[in-house]
Image (cartoon, grey):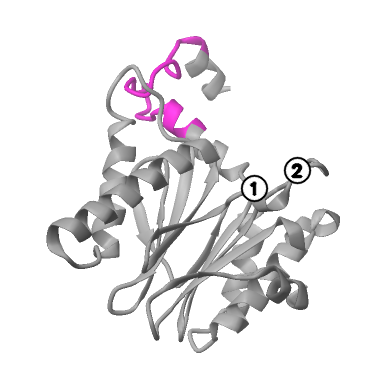
Amino acid sequence: MQAMQHQMMGYDRTSTMFSPDGRLLQVEYAKKTVKQGSPVIGIICRDGVLLVADKRIMEKLIIPKSVEKIYQVDEHIGATATGLVMDGRVLIEKAQLVAQQHRVTFDEPIDILSLVKEISDTKQAYTQYGGARPFGVSILFAGINDEPKLFVTDPTGIYFEYKATAVGDGETEIKEILEKKYKESMSIEDGLKLSVMALKKVLGKEFHIERIDGAYIATQDKKFRRIGRDRLSKLA
């Protein structure tokens, strides 16, 4: 009822207008958009860091390879987004540019935390300035400088570091599975099995291996690698 009153009074028409109880309703709507996005999972393992995502291919005639859900940001960083994927693509392209500029300027790979802060600052700016809506997307950044790192940035511009997490539709159920099953000693292969199992449980009859995208960065060489369809099919 209170939310309806706020809408009728126009507090949700701009991201810069606070409601009487101190809320930015446009930002809250953006966070709800993220919860409706296809689920994505990130896991730190003993030998690297892993990203697994559901592509949510809804039409039979779509070519699965054409749907990209996990992106390479730099040699040592990957990212996946959920919510409004077009917003995520723009922000990830910005992250790719920032990473490239850092390499050219300093002749070394960018620190993952610095990159996450840069993208989070951009997100925060769109909650503060008029004439534009907030980014309706959460992005998982995974990578390795000295050790595996996993960060989540949400539409508000906040970021958190995790050992393992999930974002998107069914995230509560997936997080419950991760909390029960996750171990810091698990390998990338173990993490991949756990991720596929969790997506199978959440997606139910809609689960199909063509919908799953995966990538990892191994501690050994700190290189971004995509997980092949054959490897995913064996696990499924």
Amino acid type at circle 1 is Ser
SS assignment for the magenta stretch, majority: loop
Instruction: Note whether residue 50 is visible.
Output: no
Residue 115 placed where, x, y %? 28, 55
Q: In this view of the protein, which residue sits in the foreground, 229 or 208?
A: 229
Image location (x, y in percent) of residue 185: 50, 89
Kind of residue indicated by mark 2: Ile
Find disc 2 in the rendering and name its residue: 62
Residue 170 visible? yes
Residue 34 drawn above or below residue 212: above
Specify the segment rendered in magenta: 8-29
- Evaluate if marks 2 and 1 touch, with contact meaning CB atoms under 8 Å apart: yes
Residue 58 rendering spot, x and y as whole percentages: 77, 42
Would you say 1 lies left or right of 222 here? right
Observer-nearest of 173 and 80? 80
Secondary structure under the numbered disc 2 in the rendered image? loop
Q: Residue furthest left?
A: 106
Residue at coordinates 78% horizontally, 72% vertically from top-left?
A: 236
Identify which residue is drawn at 56% across, 37% down: 33
Q: Is residue 89 magenta?
A: no
The residue identified by callout 1 is: 66
Viewer-proximal residue among 203 and 104: 104
Q: Secondary structure at mark 1?
A: helix
